[in-house]
Amino acid sequence: MNRNKDANGGFLSYEHKKQIPPVIKQQVLKALSFYPELKNTVISFIFRKNIRSSVMQAQPVFHTLLRKRKDRRYRINISTHFSLIRCDMPVTEIPEEVMVGWIAHELGHIMDYEQRSNTGIISFGYRYLFSSKYVKEAERVADTYAVERGLGKHLIATKRFILDHAEIPQAYKNKITRLYLSPDVIVELVKKLEEKKQKEVAQA
Ligand SMILES: [Zn+2]
């Protein structure tokens, strides 16, 4: 994949139509650089004091779903304080690789939304609220997008950070284990993807 860097070796071209808080700009742009398809998609990254039972959350801006498809906008809410975490860990203390993996997962959700119509997204939202089986499937889809974009290593770092981090409450770790792909499953996904690529190269 051709990831264009600007003259400074940065990823500033990926800032188009994005609203990003300066303290996490570098990590967000890095994650965005793996998703060139989202270049013209409007996404605001917004810090929130308190997100219930989540650290990050990708969602369409609801009222834009009532307009034309091309006017759709998204929001990625990011918890400032990680209120789930007993200790107070500012977002800036999270290792870069972990942060990029986390955002890459959220961008995977947006890729998934992008395949859906407005009414499709609304029914998706209801099912997500009421069915844990559906949540599991949606999380698998988001992780798969990130792995396919070459972010498997980052995703694994994120999962390990969550699962190994002693300060994170067990209830949250349990939620992650129950609903999300485990690091081992992601390692498997990365392996399969590499095998697929090698086969393609061999056939070419
Ligand atoms: Zn998710």
Image (cartoon, rainbow, N blue to C red):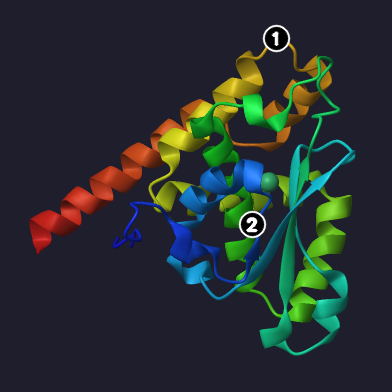
Query: Regarding mark 2 in the picture, which secondary structure is present there?
Result: helix
Q: Callout 1, which amino acid?
A: Ala
Q: Tell me which numbered mark, 1 or 2, is placed earlier along the sequence.
A: 2
Ligand 1 within 8 Å of the CB at mark 2: yes
For the question of whether residue 140 can be seen, the reply is no
Residue at 38%, 47% in the rendered image: 150
Q: What percent of the width, then of the height, locates residue 166?
A: 70, 9
Residue at 58%, 28% in the rendered image: 159
Q: Is residue 54 above or below residue 81?
A: below
Q: Nearer the viewer, residue 45 or 63?
A: 45
Residue extending farthest to the bottom is 68
* Quadrant assignment for the C terminus: bottom left
Q: Which residue is mark 1?
A: 166
Residue extending farthest to the top is 166
Residue at 56%, 30% in the rendered image: 158
Q: Nearer the viewer, residue 31 or 92?
A: 92
Q: What percent of the width, then of the height, locates residue 179?
A: 71, 36
Residue extending farthest to the front is 8
* Comparing labels 1 and 2, the label whose residue is closer to the camera: 1
* Quadrant assignment for the N terminus: bottom left
Query: Regarding mark 1 in the picture, which secondary structure is present there?
Result: loop
Judged left or right of residue 83, residue 153 is left
Q: Which residue is mark 2?
A: 109
Q: CA distance from mark 1 to mark 2?
A: 27 Å
